Image (cartoon, rainbow, N blue to C red):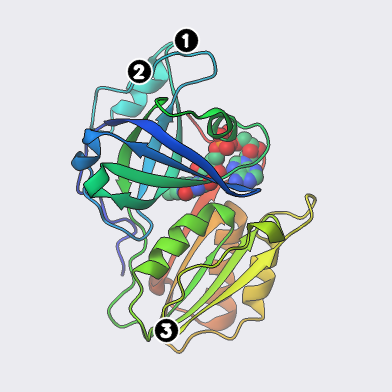
Amino acid sequence: MIPKVQLPGSRSMITLAVRHREFLSPGFANVTLGGPAVRELVVAGNDQAVRLFFPRDGQTGLRMPTLSNEAWIAQLLLAPKAVRPWVRNLTIRRVRPADDELDIEFAVHGDSPLSSWVRRAEPGDPAGIFDIGTTYRRPGHARGQLLIGDETALPAILSILEGTPPGLATEVYLEVAARADIRPGPTPAGARIHWLSRDDEDLRPGTLAVAAVRDAHLPPSPFYTWVAGESRLATTVRRHLVNDRGVPKRDISFIGYWRLGRSAPG
Ligand SMILES: Cc1cc2nc3c(=O)[nH]c(=O)nc-3n(C[C@H](O)[C@H](O)[C@H](O)COP(=O)(O)OP(=O)(O)OC[C@H]3O[C@@H](n4cnc5c(N)ncnc54)[C@H](O)[C@@H]3O)c2cc1C
C-alpha cells in the first residue's frame, strides 16, 4: 500500500516576496517568489505542494502564523479578518536555489481571492509558504504510469514529467479551460501527452478528462495512476479504473484539489 502523503522535509513558515509575475497564456500566470528564506525549503520535486499565504485586498502587510505545527490553522482562523491573510494550496513548479527563487503557476479564473491576488501581484508584495509534502508515490513495481488532471494539476503534472525516467510508458490526460492554454511540456521518451480543451464555460471541469480515460488505451500493467483536479474528476477516474478496469486501489493516488461551487477554507 502506498502511503498517501510523503510528509515534507521542512516545517517552517517561510516569508517571501513577489519578484515577478507573468501571464504564460490567457488562463495561466507564473509568480516568482524570492528571498533568503527559500533556503529553508527542502525541495522534493514532483507535486510538492504548499499552503500559500497572501494578504487580503486592502491589507498592507502579511501576518503569517507563528506556529509551525498543525495548530497554525486554529491560530489563523482565530485571528480577526482585518489581519488574517488568505491561504490556498498550490504546487511548487520549480525552485532556483542559486537565486533564492521559486515559481508557482496559477490557473486564473473569475474574481476569486487567489485569482484577484495574482492579477494585482507586483514585485515586493509579501507572500508566505508552508510545505505540505507530495502525494505522487510511484511504486517500484510500476511498468508505466497514467497521469490525469485539470488545469489546477497542470503544474504538478509538468513537474512529475520532468522527473520521469526516460522509457517509462506514460500516458497523460491534461484538461485545460481553453485551447490557448495548451503549451509544450516536457515529454520524456515513452510519454504521450493528450491535451484536452473545454472551450466552453458551461462544461464542468474534468468532464473531458473523465471521458478520455474511459476510452483510453492504458499503460502496460502494473501501472501507477496519479489523478488530481476538481473533486469529481479525481473520484470518478478512480472508481472507473478500479471497477471497470480492475486496477488495484493501492496503485492509484487520487486528490481532490478543489470543489466546484465551494471556496477553499481559510
Ligand atoms: C495540493 C494542491 C495543489 C494545488 N496546486 C495548484 C496549482 O499549482 N495551481 C492552481 O492554480 N491551483 C492549484 N490547486 C487548486 C487551488 O488550491 C484551488 O483551485 C483553490 O480553490 C483556488 O482558490 P481561489 O481563491 O481561486 O478560489 P476559491 O475561493 O477556493 O473558490 C471560489 C470559487 O471558484 C471555484 N474554483 C476554485 N478553483 C477553480 C478553478 N481552478 N477553476 C474554476 N473555478 C474554480 C470554486 O469552486 C468556488 O466556486 C491545488 C490544490 C491542492 C489541494
Residue at which label 3 appears: 189
Position above or below: 123 against 146: above
Element under disc 3: loop
Q: CA distance from mark 1 to mark 2?
A: 10 Å
CB-based contact (under 8 Å), mark 1 and mark 3: no
Comparing 134 with 77, the one in front is 134
Looking at the rendered image, the disc whose residue lies closer to the viewer, 1 or 3, is 3
- Amino acid type assigned to the residue bearing label 1 in the image: Ala
Q: Are marks 1 and 2 in contact (CB under 8 Å)?
A: no
Q: Amino acid at mark 2?
A: Arg
Indicate the secondary structure of the residue bearing disc 2: loop
- Left or right, residue 173 beside residue 219: right
Mark 2, other Cα within 10 Å: few <14 / some 14–19 / many ≥20: some
Element type at marker 1?
loop
Residue assigned mark 1: 82
Q: Quadrant of residue 19?
A: top left
Q: Within 8 Å of ligand 1, the CB of disc 3?
A: no
Q: Residue at x 56, y 28 (%)?
A: 120
Picture layout, residue 217 above or below residue 156: below
Q: In which quadrant will I find the N terminus?
A: bottom left
Q: Are marks 2 and 3 in contact (CB under 8 Å)?
A: no
Q: Residue at x 66, y 74 (%)?
A: 212
Give the residue pinned by disc 2.
Answer: 63
